[in-house]
Image: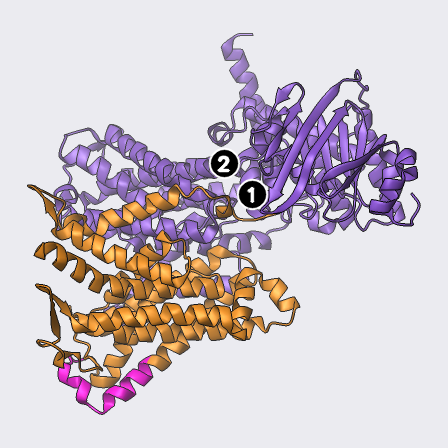
Chain colours: A purple, B orange
Amino acid sequence: MSVLEQTAVELRRAAGEARARWSTPAWLALAALGIAAAIPFLSLPGVRVDALADTAYLALAATALGLIVGPAGLPSLGTGAFMAIGAFTSALLVARSGWALEPAVLAGTAAALVAGLLCGAVVRLRREFVAVSTWLLAWLVWLFLLAFPSISGGSQGLILPPRSLLGLDATPTVHFEVALALTALTALAVSAVRRGAPGLELSALRQAPALATSLGVRLWWRRLGAFSATAAVAGLAGGLSVQLQAVADPVSYDPFLSFKLLVAVLLGGAAATLGPAVGVIVLGLIGLAAGPLARALQLPFERFDTAVAALLLVFVLAFGGQGVLPWALRRLPRQSHPRRRPATPPSGAPGPNEPVLSATGLRKAYGGVIAVDDFSLELRRGETAALIGPNGSGKTTALRLIAGAEPADAGVVVVGGVEVTVAPTAERVRLGIARTLQASTAFRELTALDDVLVGRAVRRRYGGLVRSALATPNARREQAASETAALEALAIVGLAGAADVPTPELTTSQQRLVALAAALATEPQVLLVDELAAGAGREELGLVADALERIRERGVAVLVVEHNLRLVRRVADRVLVLGAGTVLAEGSAAEVASSGVVRQAYLGTARL
Amino acid sequence: MTIALQVVISGLAAGGVYGLFAAGYSLIYRLTGIIHFAFGDLVGLGIFATLLVLAGTSPVSQSGAHEPRFLLAILVGLAVCVLAGAGTYVGLVQPYVSRGSTIGWVAGTAAVAFAIRAVIGATFQRSSYVFPDPLPFHRVGTAGYIHLGGAQVQARAFFVAGLAIALALGSAWFLERTRYGRALRAVADDREGARVVGVPVELLVTLAFALVGAIAMLAAVAAAPGEAVNANTGTLLGLKGLVAALAVRFGPPLWAFAAGLVLGVVEAAIANVHIGGWQLGPSYREVLPLAFVLLLISLWPSPEALEERE
């Protein structure tokens, strides 16, 4: 097949997918874009095209900011700083070095991207520290511009000579259309990212960082990517808008700009891709209304408009509002999702009887308390072992050491012949160790299927930010394949029918099974299951046992930590008894039950 | 030598004010788990509310301190700060904290900061105002200045430093030793847990925010008479305090105060010290410490920085 034919096939497929997902909001967005594009040509009275273009550039930056405020939940107060970096880089190149506009703007974008990558280290901190750091960044850039007039042009700013834009005279109309097109493209990219792997994983990280990390999602990598992408787009907006204004004035880039962008995102609604752009429009309208009002009241309110907007924001948010656009979208008739075909659980053939996990001499102490001491374990394909022991005997710690949630003081972990003793969690998940967590069960804002899809993080090759944003054929194919795999995992735990059910609507026991499916979706060789049946009734216990048995049939080695001895007796080929961090006894359930040591240490007088 | 001493002493004097603000920020964080972006502007609000009662929007001279209305003005300033502090919590922080939305309270407190600055800027339009000193420091030494080994230092700088240390020590005592302090720490650590064991969470945190307002007024009275003030005074001092507090990761208020002192000395050194013919100069004064603290926080390697434990 020639490249041309291949491209045609891909385009047809893309068109088909777009048709399948096309909805009323998409029509509305397209109509809004068309109307907006026509505005400069209507010569409406009182409409200043340069102000419109300026607003459109703000909308561009805000649309990108929506990605880190919405799915990632990071409160960035520094977007204006990246706009300033883009603006002054391109302004200096044009004014001092005589560059053409386009390469100068690209250089500004690159400078903002680099700044974003440099500052991006803060995104792994707690959210309040992200807010402070980005806020200080906004001040830093502004104070820098004020302190060095030789760079920023001082109080007059840098005067920019006129340049052509894309071969056209750079009139406000051209700027407006360019800004509109870029905003639309950014919105498309953000929307693709939100639907794809990065958006899902960012959202999972926001809702339950520990759970997402245990499934192999790399917090640092994902957040850094989104943060620096936002910085780059802000730099692009800054670089272009400064050419529109024809002067680079430091005063326009004070920390207030960053705050205004955040207000726009929250006001318009971070939950919708176009929410931030709507927020910018709302701010603009408030500004139009507030100007005459301030004059009528004879208030010399500098920034009266945004003070009003901030108050409005406070009310919107205080009453539980998600912003203007999500509110409006809820008013539209809901469209029914296409029904998914429930998958049948595939039957896996049990493989050869080879060890897939071996842990030797693991030790962990917290200060003077030794939680795990000389813990060794070997697991074979298709084998289910149970780890039992009284509370505080080190069961969960042992699992955490094997999964890499914390470093062991001593000992070696080998999975599939590869030593992973010092490897980070994500790497271990990729090599085949998955773990379900004891407490956190599921991501509260996702459907069961999306929840399980988070577990596909380490199996994706085309799930990066750029590929997802461009929705490349590989990325889309992989997304479809991931969904199939996630549906299979759901089918294995017996929840195939619940794929589209929001997680909070499931029972606790079902949520645990969803978590199990998510761990299974990582395609593990070894599955570590931490108290899956805690508090489960007899019927639910049966479902859990069935799921574990189906997983074993697929050749996965399973290690369950369990207090429920009925479940242990049913699923475990082998039982290890842990007491004070060491293995006291090992054997079949019956052997262990008859061991006196065990009865004394753990069971007391009860019978297994 | 004299220059070095002058730098250290003037740096410590300025740093005392930064330290006071930094101690305020870290105290708020420890009391409530909130970083109060409007704290600096609350101080500005205290300053100008006092001036408004004292003399309307017209300028005040140092002799304003002798007017009988001055005490009333300060009390009104205190009341405004306390109300603004509590109001910030009830209206702008509580709704988000209860929903676990960090972005909400970040935007809410930042909105308060900008709103206060806009109102002050619109009401008091001169470029600078004098805040009369309620305590007669101008009678100490030579017109309020003390000679210290060849260097000159404002007598009230000692008062500011003493106040900051008292605040830091007092808050440590409050948090460690009193019932309310322990309850507040419990709230900051685990809100739901504290509620379950019967801590009146909302009432306590509202009171803590009112206390924050009172601290802001204290900072206003301590810091404002030192130099001329305008609408940006509170914001800028608040920024320095935030930098110092972040440098110690909003740790104990005493550390934050120490970080403030260091920041003051570093700024003075950057502005004045030259080694041979090489000098950084005043342009770098504001920028370098800020960049350094940002770098410090970026390289913060501890796993506790991560958001959530299992």
In the figure, is residue B239 to the left or right of A554?
Answer: left
How crowded is the residue under tag 2: few (<14 C-alpha within 10 Å), some, or many (20+)?
A: many
Image: magenta residue range: B57-77
Q: Secondary structure at mark 2?
A: helix
Residue A173 among those drawn in magenta = no
Q: Position of residue A552 (x, y in %)?
A: 81, 28
Q: Chain of mark 2?
A: A
* Residue drawn at point x = 55 percent, y = 22 percent: A474
**Circle number at residue A222:** 2
Quadrant where the image shows the N terminus of chain A: top right
Sequence order check: which comes first, mark 2 or mark 1? 1
**Circle number at residue A205:** 1
In the figure, is residue B196 to the left or right of A533?
Answer: left
Rendered position, B135 above or below B276: below
Q: Position of residue A335 (x, y in %)?
A: 65, 45
In the figure, is residue A452 to the left or right of A318?
Answer: right
Residue A297 appears in the rendering: no
Residue B60 among those drawn in magenta = yes
Asked if disc 2 and disc 1 are in contact, CB closer than 8 Å, the reply is yes
Q: Residue furthest bottom?
A: B68
- Looking at numbered disc 1 in the image, what kind of residue is underneath it? Leu
Mostly what secondary structure, the magenta segment? helix
Rendered position, A403 above or below A270: above
Q: Secondary structure at mark 1?
A: helix
Relative depth, front residue between A407 and A301: A407
Rendered position, B7 above or below A225: below
Residue A572 appears in the rendering: yes
